[in-house]
Amino acid sequence: MSGVTLQSCGSCGRVWQFRRGGCPHCGSMAVCEVTASGTGTVWSVTQVMRAPLPELDVPGGYAIALVTLDEGPRVMCRAETGVVIGQRVTVSLAADGLPLARAS
């Protein structure tokens, strides 16, 4: 289980990431929460070498990826070093509660 929570529409079946009171596609209020499978494909990735905050400063930097989950939504997460565009990954919540993409 990935721990990444999505919302789904009971009327049109669409799935999205950010919480809303109604479906952004059809307007239905029949919204429920679902847990993502956690698998997806890397759509974009970048290596951050200069951290925006001192507590994020890591020797060698860190990677950030946009991952298109198999359910459809695209999520931003940290990524293991070496993750490349088009690669299959598993997204799960790290110990700090933030999503992390790892090579499948």
Image (spheres, rainbow, N blue to C red):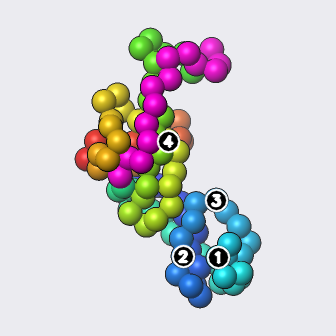
Image point (71%, 81%), residue name: 27
Residue type at mark 4 is Cys
Q: Is residue 84 magenta?
A: no
Q: Which residues are magenta?
A: 41-55
Residue 70, compared with residue 67, is above or below; it is below
Residue 28, compared with residue 82, is above or below; it is below
Q: Which badge, 4 or 1, comes first in the chain's sequence?
A: 1
The answer to which of 17 and 3 lies nearer the viewer is 17
Q: Which residue is mark 1?
A: 25
The answer to which of 1 and 29 lies nearer the viewer is 29
Residue type at mark 1 is His
Marks 4 and 3 in Cβ contact (< 8 Å): no
Q: Which badge, 1 or 2, comes first in the chain's sequence?
A: 2
Q: Which residue is mark 4?
A: 77
Marks 1 and 3 in Cβ contact (< 8 Å): no
Q: Which badge, 4 or 3, comes first in the chain's sequence?
A: 3
| Mark 4 vs mark 1, CA separation in Å | 24 Å
Residue type at mark 2 is Arg
| Mark 4 vs mark 3, CA separation in Å | 14 Å
Crowd around label 1: few <14 · some 14–19 · many ≥20 (10 Å): few
Crowd around label 3: few <14 · some 14–19 · many ≥20 (10 Å): few
Q: Which residue is mark 3?
A: 18
Q: Which residue is mark 2?
A: 14
Residue 14, compared with residue 93, is above or below; it is below
The picture places residue 50, in percent across and down from the top left corner, at 56, 15
The picture places residue 49, in percent across and down from the top left corner, at 50, 17
